[in-house]
Image: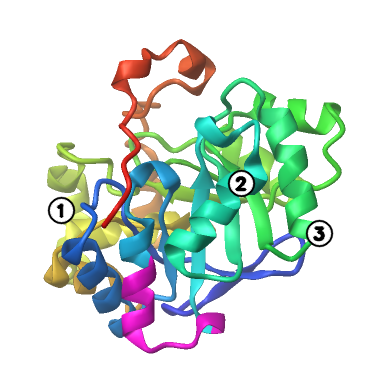
Amino acid sequence: MEINSRAVLNNGVLMPYFGLGVFRSPAGEITRSAVRTAIEYGYRMIDTARVYCNEKSVGRGIKDSGISRKDIFVTTKLWKDDFKNPRQGLLESLERLQLDYIDLYLLHWPFAGYVEAYLELEKLQKEGLIKAIGVSNFKIHHLQHLKESGASVIPQVNQVECHPENQENELLDYCRKEGILMEAYSPLGGQGRTLVNDPRIWTIADYHHVTTAQVILKWNLQRGVAIIPKSVNFERILENSQIFSFDLTPGDMDILNDINLNLRRAYDSDKIDQRPEESFPRLIDED
């Protein structure tokens, strides 16, 4: 595997296993520069969302890179405010990104009405406005409910929090059987976590002469899970991409597998509709 290695999704679309996430990256020059720099370093997938309020900055960074549109895989996500009108939500994201189509469009959470919203994504995909469709933060029963409710398209991707402390093994097995690519956000454990300081991971990193972050990222890739590590630091963006010169041994993988605590930072998707409205990010327009 190399930085441009791609998975074949269940509809034949090719998606990079590795990309840049921009969750909590502030709109403006910081995000624009991070995206442009990542592409210069070889990244070919950028993951954003309506609720991140930085789609314009992502689009500007992609344009500044000078790389052909067909060579950049862009993911964005439908927020709950647009579940009743996914077409409008998509068109507005396309306008902000200054793109003609989205490579991967995800339902951000299984908010109430997610089945109806997903069925609308199927229509938009048939029109060519979206190359691949999928979901984020969906558990097995959410995926099963989609199927039972008449969805004709198996989600191409399910993006979830996934790292050695929250391995989602049962969900990963289910996705593999259903032909759904699992993609990890917060692949390093999330902001403020001490996973990179775990002495077990330090031992592995020392052996391979790499960083603990590189070990953690490579662990998910070797499980066949796509990853979108987030950073706006140019050195860290480069470091995260330099994980293709070594492979973890079966013993290394066993050590990392033993770290699992089923410990997640993200909100419980089964309770997402009970989350207080004031706790959600406020949607703002970029300059």
Q: Which residue range is magenta in the image? A: 59-70
Instruction: Tell me, for residue 88, which label it has, or none.
Output: 2
69 w.r.t. 26: above or below: below
Give the side of residue 205 with respect to residue 77, left or right.
left
85 w.r.t. 76: above or below: above
Crowdedness near tag 2: few (<14), some (14–19) or many (≥20) residues, C-alpha within 10 Å: few
Return the residue at label 1: 202
Instruction: Tell me, for residue 126, which label it has, or none.
Output: 3
Query: Residue 112 appears in which quarter of the rendering?
Result: top right
Q: Report the amino acid beneath label 2.
A: Gln
Residue 243 shows up from this direction: no
Crowdedness near tag 3: few (<14), some (14–19) or many (≥20) residues, C-alpha within 10 Å: few
Q: CA distance from mark 3 to mark 2?
A: 16 Å
Give the side of residue 262 with respect to residue 57, left or right.
right
Closer to the chain start, of discs 3 and 2, is 2
Q: Residue 152: where, in percent of width, then height?
A: 86, 44
Q: Looking at this view, is 268 or 55 the one in front?
A: 55
Query: Residue 89 appears in which quarter of the rendering?
Result: top right
Q: Looking at this view, is 139 or 37 the one in front?
A: 37
Asked whether residue 67 is drawn in magenta, I would say yes
Residue 62 shows up from this direction: yes
